Amino acid sequence: MNFAIQHSALRDLHDKVVAGERLSDADALRLFESKDINAVGAIADFARQRKVGNRASYILNRYINYSNYCILSCQFCSFARKKRDADGFELTIEQMVQKAREALALGITELHIVGGLHPSLPFSYYVDMLKALSALNSEIGNRQSAIGNGQRLQLKCFTAIEVLHLAWLAKKSVEQTLIELKTAGLDSLTGGGAEIFRKEVRSAIAKGKESAEEYLDVHRTWHRLGGRSTCTMLFGHVEKLEDRVHHLSLLRALQDETHGFTGFVPLPYQPENNDIPVRVPPTGFDQLRTIAVSRLYLDNFDHITAYWVGMGLKLAQVALSYGADDLHGTIVEEHIFHMAGAKSPQLQTEAEMVKAIREAGRIPVQRDTFYEAVKVWSSDSKSETDRMAVKA
């Protein structure tokens, strides 16, 4: 038994996890309230090891935001703009395709695409965008698998609120809208927009946004169509620890029902350039315990991501010993967190992510959108094969 657990007040929860028993909401709150971060982390690390072994993953992806014009005015958001704002932007489909081609030359396997709820773009824009980006797969084939290993380009697009907006534009049900988007090339939904599900908190930080029930129903519908998605939680603003547990409980219940979530991504709140009066962003302690509790409570999720954009790569690396098994992606160009004050770089190279994973004592794995392995590295950086692969 880990020394940190042996004399800890959390010993009974460790024994419960080892026995494979599900943690209750009260157990999760107790873990959140504990100051014994070493014990919480050790229990979470045990659960991670049992679930996924010694591997830790990353993805070669690119973020593309098609526009930051939005009809909503969420209090926490630093990204959205109105048409009158000088720093608003809107990409044409041709510009999207050009960004995608540039990213393919870097070896990316996934485009992660979200935007604001645009006031005037028609539904056809989104369908045509997916079709144009999907068509790049034929170019990849003609260039002898430009992204390597025969891996097709995967399109991970749209938050739940975007899907509801598109359904309104198309004058169709959510299910019919998702079917049409899937036919056009959509591979996976993003998990963004979950924020905090508790109604009172949601009203305080994102008034006018979709309800928790609507968010969950979009993902439920997508899962029933055979689709997969990730999910998130924005933490460290005005919510209480009980609100985090409530949020996680709704995600765990939906996962019990559909088994459609591939992974969970806790997102630390960034406090700049918005209307929520939070002077201090989530501390390193808070970020590590949130990842650890998520691993332990979300026992039906295989993957927990340490989102380096919000955490910084160094803390995300530490999180690999606190329950996380994924560092997210290379990203290339990120707007939403950086417009809210994130000080992390705009991108990470594959070599940097592989190095961070190795230093944490894990085996680096390049994954795809669905957390399936594309390439498994050796655990030894001295491997000649690895040196050649990193250079490539």
Image (cartoon, grey):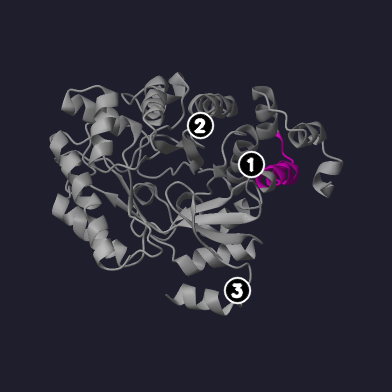
* Separation of residues labelled 2 and 3 (CA atoms): 36 Å
- Per the image, label 1 sits on a secondary structure element best described as helix
Q: Is the residue under label 3 in contact with that under label 1 (CB below 8 Å)?
A: no
Mark 3 neighbour class, 10 Å CA radius: few under 14, some 14 to 19, many 20 or more: some
Q: Which range of residues does the magenta coloring cover?
A: 34-48
Can you say whether 333 is above or below 10 in the image? Answer: below
Which residue corresponds to the image point at 28% horizontal and 25% vertical from the top-left?
A: 174
Task: Report the disc number at residue 292.
Answer: 1
Q: Look at mark 2 in the image and give the residue it sits on.
A: 259
- What residue type is disc 1 on? Ala
Residue 120 pos. (x, y %) = 12, 35
Depth-wise, is mark 2 or mark 1 nearer the camera? 2
- For the residues labelled 1 and 3, the Cα–Cα distance comes to 28 Å
The reply, left or right, for residue 368 in relation to residue 318 is left
Between disc 2 and disc 1, whose residue precedes?
A: 2
Q: Position of residue 132 (x, y in %)?
A: 18, 50
Q: Which mark is residue 381?
A: 3
